[in-house]
């Protein structure tokens, strides 16, 4: 299938089941954009900072921080986003503190369903449309969106608001966010998964709900952590035949490891076929990285592989 050129979009969202490497994949994509010379902002949404360790940078908080050449990161929290937005509207920070930081108002704001999600999305939207001297400030906005269930809830919030309200500032803000989210020239939601049963099932569900309910344009499925085959079928047969004549424990252990690798790659191949059958999107594949902790060099390897996969899918 011909690939969507993700490098032509400005807002790239990455979601998927928890634990599939969503942050790693979104960081690798952001790094590939930066290496292409594009000024890129990588956004985390109200999470414990995971990005800084991969880039060997200082802690990423609510202030935009440079983590690599051409690449900045920020961790948007509802509190910081609301304060920034309110100050933008009220113009004076001391007025914000008087209005929003009293106990009654804080309790009231906590009681508004979906407000946290709306202000975080609003902050991301602001950076998508942010301009300076008539030009966009950022070439790419890459969002490490929440895992499947929370991600769907987050992206649904503007639609829910416009279905309840018919006018007012909140309604208009939600409408502007929907317009950007549904613009295929700007936005692509990418689905990150592992080639395993539960992640694949969740990815299929996420795809169907995004298509049927959110109507947000989708870019690609990215299968992370895929083992590269080490043995052909004939080599595997030779190994098993040899095992019948081997008594040395260390050699038998290596043959067992080889068998495990073959079984794992066969299992993953089956789930990759299921992805291709059930999800009509281009699929990119990233290899399993044998490292106890993702560091910059490993991330760069994934970034280069992802760029090669995306560019290779172009006609």
Image (tube, rainbow, N blue to C red):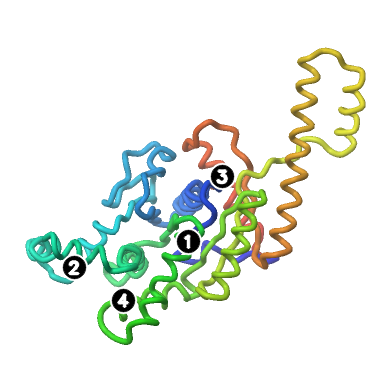
The Cα atoms of the two marked residues, 4 and 1, are separated by: 19 Å
Query: Measuring 11% from the left and 66% from the top, which residue is drawn there?
Result: 99
Element type where label 2 sits in the image: helix
**Dot placed on the residue nearer the N-terminal end, 2 or 1:** 1
Please tell me whether mark 1 or mark 3 is closer to you in this view. Answer: 1
Mark 3 is surrounded, within 10 Å at the Cα level, by few (under 14), some (14 to 19) or many (20 or more) other residues, namely many
Quadrant location, the C terminus: bottom right
Task: Residue 231: give x, y in percent of width and height.
Answer: 81, 35
Q: Relative to 78, is 245 on the left or the right?
A: right
Query: Measuring 26% from the left and 83% from the top, which residue is drawn there?
Result: 168
Residue under label 1: 13
Element type where label 4 sits in the image: helix
Instruction: Look at the numbered discs 2 and 4 and tell me whether their residues touch, using CB distance below 8 Å.
Output: no
Element type where label 1 sits in the image: strand
**Dot placed on the residue nearer the N-terminal end, 3 or 2:** 2
Please tell me whether mark 4 or mark 3 is closer to you in this view. Answer: 4
Query: Measuring 44% from the left and 39% from the top, which residue is drawn there?
Result: 54
The Cα atoms of the two marked residues, 2 and 4, are separated by: 14 Å
The Cα atoms of the two marked residues, 4 and 3, are separated by: 36 Å
Task: Residue 295: give x, y in percent of width and height.
Answer: 48, 35
Task: Residue 286: give x, y in percent of width and height.
Answer: 62, 47
Query: Measuring 35% from the left and 64% from the top, which residue is drawn there?
Result: 117
* Furthest residue toward top: 248
**Dot placed on the residue nearer the N-terminal end, 4 or 3:** 4
Q: Nearer the viewer, residue 7 or 154?
A: 154
Mark 2 is surrounded, within 10 Å at the Cα level, by few (under 14), some (14 to 19) or many (20 or more) other residues, namely few
Residue under label 2: 88
């Amino acid at each position: 299938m011909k690939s969507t050129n993700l490098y032509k979009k400005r807002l790239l969202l990455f979601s998927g089941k928890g634990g599939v490497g969503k942050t790693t994949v979104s960081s690798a994509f952001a790094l590939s954009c930066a290496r292409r010379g594009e000024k890129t902002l990588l956004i985390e949404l109200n999470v414990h900072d995971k990005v800084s360790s991969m880039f060997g940078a200082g802690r990423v908080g609510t202030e935009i921080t440079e983590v690599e050449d051409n690449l900045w990161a920020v961790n948007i929290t509802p509190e910081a986003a609301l304060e920034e937005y309110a100050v933008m509207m009220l113009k004076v920070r001391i007025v914000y503190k008087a209005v929003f930081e009293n106990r009654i108002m804080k309790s009231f704001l906590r009681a508004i369903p979906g407000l946290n999600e709306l202000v975080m999305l609003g902050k991301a939207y602001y950076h998508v449309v942010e301009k300076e001297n008539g030009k966009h400030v950022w070439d790419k906005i890459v969002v490490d969106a929440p895992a499947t269930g929370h991600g769907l809830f987050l992206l649904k919030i503007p639609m829910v608001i416009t279905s309840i309200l018919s006018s007012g500032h909140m309604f208009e803000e939600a409408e502007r966010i929907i317009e950007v989210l549904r613009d295929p020239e700007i936005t692509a939601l990418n689905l990150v998964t592992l080639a395993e049963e539960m992640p694949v099932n969740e990815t299929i569900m996420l795809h169907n709900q995004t298509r049927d309910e959110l109507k947000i344009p989708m870019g690609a499925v990215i299968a992370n952590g895929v083992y590269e085959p080490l043995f052909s079928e004939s080599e595997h047969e030779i190994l098993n035949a040899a095992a019948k004549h081997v008594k040395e424990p260390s050699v038998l252990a290596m043959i067992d490891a080889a068998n495990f690798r073959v079984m794992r790659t066969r299992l993953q191949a089956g789930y990759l076929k299921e992805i291709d059958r059930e999800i009509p999107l281009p699929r990119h594949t990233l290899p399993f990285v044998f490292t106890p902790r993702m560091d910059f060099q490993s991330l760069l390897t994934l970034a280069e592989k992802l760029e090669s996969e995306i560019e290779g899918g172009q006609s």
